[in-house]
């Protein structure tokens, strides 16, 4: 009989792997699409390509997976165990001597695997993705040339600059150019050219215009000066956003930088050190919910009575309990950011959930709770 146990454990693990992967994929897809919309406006307005958009949205994924993986694991594990129970496979396993402890081994193996994946995203991939994405966004915002290559429309790639391009040929030559420079509102200047080309030189982006005029008016518009030119080079880098070194935010930092931060300039917010410390502890505790959720899923499916009504109620209660524990974890993170003495709550909440699940697996929580509401059956006198 003991020789069959590894086969049953492998079977249970395979039955859990599919639902867990499916729920994680579905949740990731929904949240990823909603988060990627905020990058869509930047990509479109700056004339970037579809691969650039996909690349930026992929960099967001690790920060989403830190939240999604534990929740997806709970939903998948609960569904997988429920399916085994609904098909009476758990009953057959228990009749053959397969105990709750043995059933819990593949569930905990799956939980540990998802927990390590969450740690990988939380401690390494998330800060790496955040830093890479911010650097890429700064490059896109600084690329003023790509932002103005939108023919047939008035583009405003920078404050005080309006560009119109009538036609852009495949070889990069431009036909019909209008550039309106309104940085100096007292003396706005308009450049009109028949043709031109956008060139990336060692000194930066330059718009080379040919056969055109420069029109400049006074503030009142009473005087107009016109200058014709055969060739004029317009400096676009003067409108580019200057790339200043940004202060690393909490999500951009690795774990060592959260607990032992270094600042080139003192932070303006006096609570910054505490916020970084709370973020570090949250990254250490968030993956622990995988273990708690594994125990909750086991308790929901395997403990208590098997009557349909009681079983459905138990699934509902433990699903709500898992949601409440995770919401309480986020609340504890916010509370600890204001009161550092409450940091222990970040560790206490998943631990408390795991203890409740273990007690229920022993049959000491819900049976006693529901026993209070049962009407005692009178015993007839002899």
Image: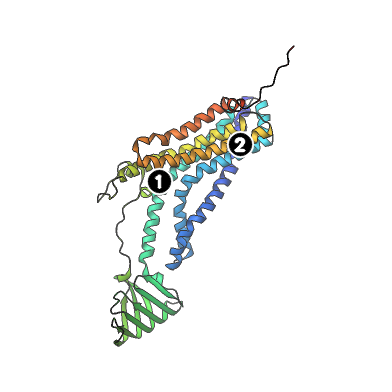
Identify the residue position indicated by label 1 in the image: 124
Estimate the x, y position of residue 234 in percent, counting from the top left: 31, 77
Q: Is mark 2 on a helix, strand or loop?
A: helix
Examine the rendering and report whether any part of residue 15 can be seen: no
Query: Which residue sits at x=30%, y=76%?
Result: 185
Q: What element carries label 1?
A: helix
Q: Residues within 10 Å of mark 1 (few under 14, many from 20)?
A: some
Task: Give the quarter of the figure containing the N terminus.
Answer: top right
Estimate the x, y position of residue 69 in percent, counting from the top left: 50, 44
Q: Looking at this view, is 364 or 113 the one in front?
A: 364
> Which quadrant would residue 318 be assigned to in this image?
top right
Examine the rendering and report whether any part of residue 272 can be seen: yes
Task: Give the quarter of the figure containing the C terminus.
Answer: top right
Q: How crowded is mark 2: few (under 14 residues within 10 Å), some or many (20 or more)?
A: some
Query: Which residue sits at x=39%, y=76%?
Result: 163
Estimate the x, y position of residue 210 in percent, counting from the top left: 35, 84
Q: In this view, does 294 lie to the left or right of 306?
A: left
Estimate the x, y position of residue 166 in percent, counting from the top left: 44, 80
Identify the residue position indicated by label 2 in the image: 315
Q: Looking at this view, is 23 or 206 the one in front?
A: 23
């Amino acid at each position: 009989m003991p020789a069959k146990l590894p086969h049953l454990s492998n079977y249970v693990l395979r039955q859990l792997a599919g639902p867990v992967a499916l729920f994680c994929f579905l949740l990731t897809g929904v949240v990823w699409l909603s988060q990627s919309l905020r990058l869509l406006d930047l990509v479109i307005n700056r004339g970037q390509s579809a691969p650039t958009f996909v690349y930026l949205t992929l960099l967001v994924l690790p920060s989403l997976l830190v939240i999604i993986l534990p929740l997806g694991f709970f939903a998948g594990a609960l569904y997988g165990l429920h399916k085994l129970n609904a098909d009476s496979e758990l009953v057959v396993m228990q009749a053959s001597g397969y105990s709750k402890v043995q059933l819990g081994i593949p569930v905990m193996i799956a939980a540990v695997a998802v927990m390590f994946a969450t740690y990988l995203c939380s401690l390494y991939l998330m800060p790496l993705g955040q830093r890479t994405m911010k650097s890429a966004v700064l490059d896109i915002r600084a690329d003023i040339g790509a932002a103005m290559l939108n023919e047939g429309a008035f583009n405003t790639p920078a404050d005080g600059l309006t560009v119109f391009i009538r036609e852009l040929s495949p070889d990069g030559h431009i036909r019909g150019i209008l550039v309106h420079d309104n940085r100096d509102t007292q003396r706005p200047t308009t450049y009109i050219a028949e043709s031109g080309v956008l060139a990336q030189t060692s000194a930066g982006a330059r718009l080379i215009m040919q056969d055109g005029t420069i029109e400049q008016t006074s503030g009142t518009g009473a005087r107009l000066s016109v200058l014709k030119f055969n060739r004029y080079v317009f400096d676009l880098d003067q409108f580019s956003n200057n790339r200043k070194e940004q202060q690393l935010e909490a999500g951009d930092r690795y774990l060592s930088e959260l607990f032992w931060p270094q600042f080139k300039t003192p932070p303006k917010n006096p609570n910054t050190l505490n916020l970084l410390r709370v973020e570090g502890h949250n990254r250490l505790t968030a993956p622990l919910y995988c273990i708690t959720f594994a125990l909750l899923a086991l308790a929901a499916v395997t403990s208590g009575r098997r009557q349909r009504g009681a079983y459905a109620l138990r699934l509902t209660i433990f699903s709500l309990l898992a949601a409440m524990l995770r919401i309480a974890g986020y609340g504890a993170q916010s509370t600890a950011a204001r009161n550092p003495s409450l940091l222990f709550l970040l560790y206490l909440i998943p631990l408390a959930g795991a203890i409740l699940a273990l007690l229920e697996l022993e049959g000491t929580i819900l049976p006693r709770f529901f026993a209070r509401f049962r009407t005692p059956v009178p015993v007839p006198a002899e």
